[in-house]
Every structure is written in structure tokens, then in C-alpha cells.
Amino acid sequence: MVSKGIGFAIALLVITISFTPAFALTELERSSVNNPRLENAFGLQISDNVNVNHQMQISADITNNQDKSQTFVYLVQIKDKTGFVVSLGWISGQLTPDQKLSPSLSWSPKSEGEFTAEIYVWEGFPINHKALAEYTTLKINVS
């Protein structure tokens, strides 16, 4: 006699759905830095050719691209043509949602030459210095 067994198969189907909203920002998109420029003490734009000992403001437009407030540090590092840092300065503040601000830091070159201002917007400095945006540069010619 042959016995026939009845077999049962149970299948479990698990479906996981995840999505990234279209409005999600990457870490470097939380703010933006645009329009780097040199200004005089009155906030008027000047050329990138300046004289030794001429005080100028290094400005840029920063925007909080988030729907929440964000603390920030506006940092400007100036290097000579060899890459040596000749000046470093920063200011900090708070941006409200979608706020645009144009901070500036002053600099008076002490010698002639070609310089590059690197402009950063970070979450903090010197601790927790996470970038909020891609940095930008500005060439400065001093005579």
C-alpha cells in the first residue's frame, strides 16, 4: 500500500515601500552661496582690482533653502598665489526659513599680488563644521 501525503506550502510575501520626497535636500543644499563680490564700506560693489591697504568687504548672498531656521557661520579664507592663508575670518548668525542674507567681512591687503577668497557657509565653527553649501571663490588682484 502506498500512502500519499498531502503537502502544504505557505508563502509569505513582504513588500517594503520607501520613497524620497521630491523636496528633500542633501546636506550641501541646505543653503546656497551666490554672487561673491567685493564692496566698499557703503555696500557698493567695486572691481576685483584693488590697492594695497585699501579696505574692502568680501560679500556673498546666502539663502536658507529649508523650511526651518538654521544657525550658520560665514567664513572667508584668503590665500595668496602660493596657497598660503593670509587671512581668516568668520561671523555667525541665524537664518529663518527661506531667508536671504548678504554678510560681509572686511580685509585690507598688505602686499601686492593675486589672491583668492574662499567663502564657506558652515553649520558651526570650529566644532561641528558641517558644510551647508558648496563653497565659492573670488579672485582678487592687488596692486
Image (cartoon, grey):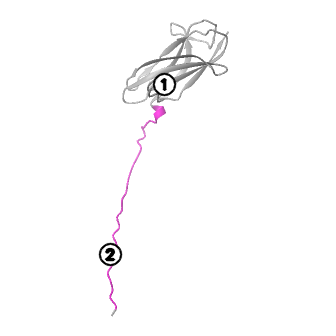
- Residue 51, image x and y in percent? 64, 7
Provide the secondary structure element on which disc 2 rests. Answer: loop
Provide the secondary structure element on which disc 1 rests. Answer: strand
Residue 101 included in the magenta stretch of the image: no
Q: Residues within 10 Å of mark 2 (few under 14, many from 20)?
A: few
As drawn, the residue found furthest toward the bottom would be 1
**Residue assigned mark 2:** 8
Q: Earlier in the sequence, mark 2 or mark 1?
A: 2
Instruction: Name the chief secondary structure element in magenta.
Output: loop
- Residue 121, image x and y in percent? 48, 24
The residue segment tinted magenta is: 2-29
As drawn, the residue found furthest toward the front would be 127
Q: Is residue 85 above or below residue 7?
A: above
- Residue 128, image x and y in percent? 44, 28
**Residue assigned mark 1:** 121
Q: Residues within 10 Å of mark 1 (few under 14, many from 20)?
A: many
Badge 2 amino acid: Phe
Residue 21 included in the magenta stretch of the image: yes
Residue at image point 50% right, 15% down: 104
Quarter the N terminus occupies: bottom left
Quarter the C terminus occupies: top right
Q: Quadrant of residue 13?
A: bottom left
Residue at image point 37% right, 57% down: 15
Badge 1 amino acid: Val
Give the Cα separation between the discs numbered 2 and 1. 63 Å
